[in-house]
Image (tube, helix red, strand yellow):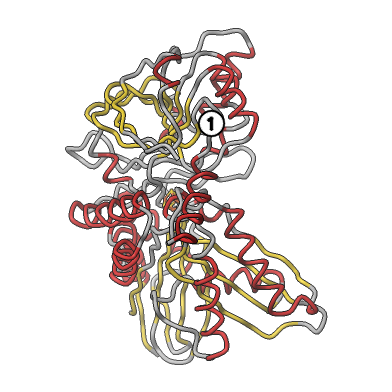
Amino acid sequence: MKQIHVRDISGAVKNLCIEANTCLGEDVLNRLRECRDRESSAIGRQVLSQIVRNADMARDEAMPMCQDTGVAVVFVELGQEVHIQGGNLTDAIQEGVSEGYRQGYLRKSMVRDPFDRVNTGDNTPAVIHLETVPGDLLRLTVAPKGGGSENMSTVVMLPPSAGLDGVREFVLNWVERAGANPCPPVIVGVGIGGNFEHCAYLAKKSLLRDIGDRHPDPFYAALEIQLLEAVNTLGIGPQGFGGDCTALEVFIETAPCHIASLPVAVNLQCHAARHRQAVL
Amino acid sequence: MKKAVQHIITPPLTEESCMRLMAGDSVLIRGSIYTARDAAHQRMVQCLERGEPLPVSLDGQIIYYAGPSPAKPGHIVGSIGPTTAGRMDAYAPALIEAGLKGMIGKGSRSGTVTDAMRKHHAVYLGAIGGAAVLLAKCILEVQIEAYEDLGPEAVRRLVVHDFPAVVINDCHGNDLYRSGRKNHLRSIRHA
Ligand code: SF4
């Protein structure tokens, strides 16, 4: 058994919260630059240049790239040979989020109840997805998710007869309807299959992939490329001002599903596509 | 399509100054603007409903839909980009009637809001969602004016210099989200 102390888990989560919010991944930055150079709309080019400049400034000054530092979503892959020492895993993660949001001067956006809406003051609780895996590693991924793009996300239970065309149409219509609200250019996370809650999880999880990382199955890889091209003919453009670059990427994750169902979830991610990983 | 122009605007805005702003134009704001989001809007509208004065006069003013991240030591404000304006749609017409002339946010507005904007000559401006560090650099002064208990949602007066925004909805009924997309699609078809 490998021993991992809760102190190390909290510390790692704290750092990940701060890094994720201040340093946009190189993969996203490179795609933004490519899209800026290719954009045919003048105002679109301007918007993309400012987004790139903003990300550079955020990194250089260690400031959050967006004021909405989101719900802290934490994906945990816990090797079954790992023994957690000194406390429990969930508390350690929440502690790390609390510390990270305080020490990093990140905005606290969580309320304790959907109706009384009193701020919890430290951005906890984080949403934690725990998976046990073989081995003796603990992999932590922090993915802060802003409200603007999260509000423009959805799940639908299509009839299996809707097929591939039905799914394509649903995703395209959804991005079109979301328009400027999720701060385009967006990343479109699509979960297909599973059941009601699992497809939403798949859509969210797809957003952890690096830009350009294609689905391992050539069929879905081709569908990702096709959907990306289709989204980018909508003309919504950066910030919805009109332009070629509406999405930076489309990611699809799939799972087996019931004979009667074709669940589809679309989780839109804004250009502030933040996620950071550590392995203990 | 008319060519987009750049304006420098200084609140308080008048009807005439709003009428000159056309969807697609860019503006640089100099002077004072106020932040307010969901909770502050709710309180201000409740104030108006009770017939009480607002904590700040909105006559000719601009509200920035924004809730900053905390300021780091030595800074006056943290990151501060726009939030989704649609959430304020239920409250905006009452504030426009109370004299509000400009709103800064991101995302589309409802017909009720754009109708109120036409009637009272107000404008809706878009700032770049997510460009929160860049926008923070345009802020020279920050002062909490009301509802301090709301934390990031408190009403703050910001003194800004050359704060960049784009006119989304003008008071003549134009909407950049519609026209920008349409013009772009037309231009690539003809390219
Ligand atoms: S959608 Fe993203 S970029 Fe836009 S305000 Fe929210 S977190 Fe920031």
Quadrant (top left/top right/bottom left/bottom right) for the C terminus of chain A: bottom left
Q: Quadrant of residue A2?
A: bottom left
Label 1 chain ID: B
Rendered residue at 48%/91% (across/down): A134
Determine whether A277 is above or below B113 in the image. below
Determine whether A251 is above or below B47 in the image. below
Q: Which one is in front, A269 or B142?
A: A269
Element at label 1: helix
Rendered residue at 38%/35% (across/down): B25
Can the viewer see residue A99? no
Q: Quadrant of residue A271?
A: bottom left
Rendered residue at 59%/32% (across/down): B89
Can the viewer see residue A44? yes
Q: Could you tell me residue B5's position as x and y percent?
A: 33, 34
Count of all numbered marks drawn on residues in the image: 1
Left/right placement of residue A203 relative to residue B138 reads right
Q: Which residue is mark 1?
A: B39
Furthest-right residue in this view: A260
Left/right placement of residue A120 relative to residue A175 reads left
Q: Could you tell me residue A153's position as x and y percent?
A: 59, 59
Rendered residue at 31%/68% (across/down): A34
Q: Could you tell me residue A219's position as x and y percent?
A: 57, 89
Left/right placement of residue A16 relative to residue B94 reads left
Q: Which one is in front, A96 or B100?
A: B100
Q: Amino acid at mark 1?
A: Ala
Q: Could you tell me residue A104's position as x and y percent?
A: 29, 52
Quadrant (top left/top right/bottom left/bottom right) for the N terminus of chain A: bottom left
